[in-house]
Image (spheres, rainbow, N blue to C red):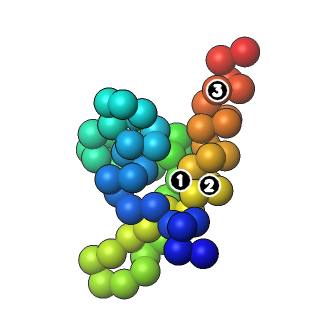
Amino acid sequence: MQSDLLDRVEVCRYFGGSRPINPATLYRGIRQGRYPRPVKVGPGSSRWLRSECELALRVMTEARR
C-alpha cells in the first residue's frame, strides 16, 4: 500500500508534470476543492492517496469537454 501514498513533492509533480505545481498552489487548490485532502500519517507528516489524485485529475480533464 505504500506505493499508493504520495508525499507533497510527488503530488506537485503528479499534477504539474515536467513543471511541478508550487506547494502553495496545491494547498490553495485543496481549500477550493480542486485537489484531494491529505491523510495525516504522523505528527507533521501527510500523504495523499494516489487513487484520489488520479480521480481529481480525471475530473479536471473531463471538465474540459
- Tell me which corner region of the image, top left, top right, bottom left or bottom right, holds residue 45: bottom left
- Disc 3 element: helix
Residue 41 in view (yes/no):
yes
Q: Quadrant of residue 17?
A: top left
Q: Nearer the viewer, mark 1 or mark 2?
A: 2
Q: Position of residue 51 (x, y in %)?
A: 64, 56
In the picture of the structure, the residue carrying the numbered disc 2 is 52
Residue matched to label 3: 61
Question: Judging from the image, what secondary structure is the residue with disc 2 in?
Answer: helix
User: Residue at 67% across / 36% down in the picture?
Assistant: 58
Disc number placed over residue 36 in the picture, else none: 1
Residue closest to the far bottom: 42
Question: Label 1 is placed on what type of residue?
Answer: Pro
Question: Seen in the image, is 29 located left or right of residue 63?
Answer: left
Instruction: Residue type at mark 2: give it.
Output: Glu
Task: Give the residue type that dot 3 points to.
Answer: Thr
- Residue 21: x and y, percent? 33, 37
34 and 5: which is toward the camera: 5
Quadrant position of the N terminus in the picture:
bottom right
The reply to whether the C-beta atoms of the residues labelled 1 and 2 are less than 8 Å apart is: yes
Task: Indicate whether 45 appears above or below 64.
Answer: below
Q: Residue at x 27, y 39 (%)?
A: 22
Indicate which label's residue lies in the foreground, 3 or 1. 3
Numbered tag placed on residue 51 in the rendering: none
Instruction: Decide which of tag 2 and tag 3 comes sooner along the chain.
Output: 2
